[in-house]
Amino acid sequence: MKHLFQTLSRLACLALCLAGLIGQSQLASADDSQILIRAKSIHTASGETIAPGQVLIAGGKIVAIGKEVQAQGGATEIEVDTLIPGLINAAGSTGLGNRAAEVSREITPDFATARSVDWSSRQFAEALDQGVTTIQILPETESVFSGFACVVKTAGEARLIDGEKGVVIAICSDPASGNRSRSRPDSIYVRQPTNRMGVVWIVRNALHQAKNKGSILGVDPKTQHVLEKIVAGKMSVLSVSRMDYDIRSALELGGQYNFKPTIYGGDEVYRMLDTFKESGASLVYTALTTSSSRLRGSEGTELRWNVPGQMHEARIKFCLAGSNLLDQARFAVRYGLPTDQALMSITLHPAKILNLDKEIGSIEVGKQADLVALSGDPLKPTSRVEWTMLRGKIYGNKEEK
């Protein structure tokens, strides 16, 4: 009878955890690696702030959250001021060093960016210090079809999450920069394209041939297979496009060849908010500067501080990406983005764009314990990162706790 009662009790506890109920008191099953975090404020990024609140972690995942959580069998207890989800950078170059592109050819969609990552790079530690737990790394954009993006963790084991998250295409001036057509063909830079028109032509021609099962000059079978997956709607496309006419070109090509690109960059999306909204595409916005000394972005684009607020009002699906994510969110709030949306733009929104929101992006039962402890309000400039937790392990002050 005693054993039956214990079994029923454990099943009841498990049911509560799976349901994700938030209440005044919750009970979680015992675990040797349990951690109970008590916070003055928990910003879940899923629409609710719990103040004060507690989070129970076991086996690297969140098993309970509420005003008061009881850990059966005891747990390591930690007190913090503010707790938020781990930050997600959807457009990074962390660990790539000086070269992460195949520049001898214009069409290299199968280039494996993950193989170019230096996993020992101090850039990962620096990102972790800033609260970043997950990064999507993009290849350099010197080729029109640049290669596969990859998603990685900033620390721990099994850091490569997905080595082929999507194919990056560069519908911008990057592939044409430095190329020339009227000189001796003794350099890799004597190649196509030499202007934006050439970039679009290469994309259109390659996808047209792939759609009609035609062979593309100079392309091997593996590359051909990736292009065919794009036009079959079986491969995500990430288009690096900054100028408004490049964004329009990327959206138009997607409509013609059966894919909806996620736009990366988007510096001049403010010129076409209605058109972008109608497309239903998502935007990974990398143009928000946190420095008043920078008034021009890549390709000479005009920078704006209020674009995130405009995109929110237009109901465009977007996230912030690049360096200094917390500072970007703070600047966005200062210029019109609601505070809850600002936090979501560096946590839950990038998780949704990367199709990882079932695992990360918010503080919810069942998700990975990727968390950041702050000394105060996350969107106040005086608040600092105290430590970063990744899959239930705490990293801070250059030491794993």
Image (cartoon, rainbow, N blue to C red):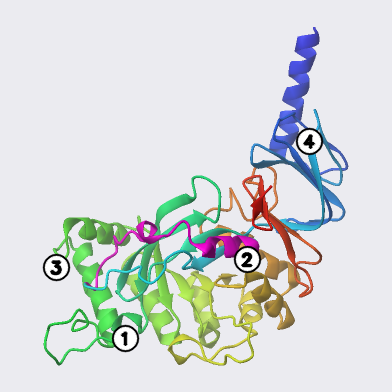
The alpha-carbon separation of the residues under discs 1 and 3 comes to 22 Å
Name the front one of labels 1 and 4.
4
> Which of marks 1 and 2 precedes in the sequence?
1
Question: What crowding class fits label 1: few (fewer than 14 Cα within 10 Å), some (14-19), or many (20 or more)?
Answer: some
Number of the label disc, if any, that sits on residue 177: 1
Disc 2 marks a residue whose amino acid type is: Ile
Residue 306: x, y in percent? 65, 84
The magenta region covers 105-129
Residue 43 appears at what percent x and percent y?
76, 58
Q: Which residue is mark 4?
A: 75
Residue type at mark 4 is: Ala
Circles 3 and 2 in contact, beta carbons < 8 Å? no
SS for tag 1?
Answer: loop
**Amino acid bearing label 3:** Gly
Task: Provide the residue designation for mark 3.
Answer: 218
Q: Which element carries disc 4, helix, strand or loop?
A: loop
Mark 1 / mark 3, whichever is N-terminal = 1
Depth check: give the residue in front, 261 or 400.
400
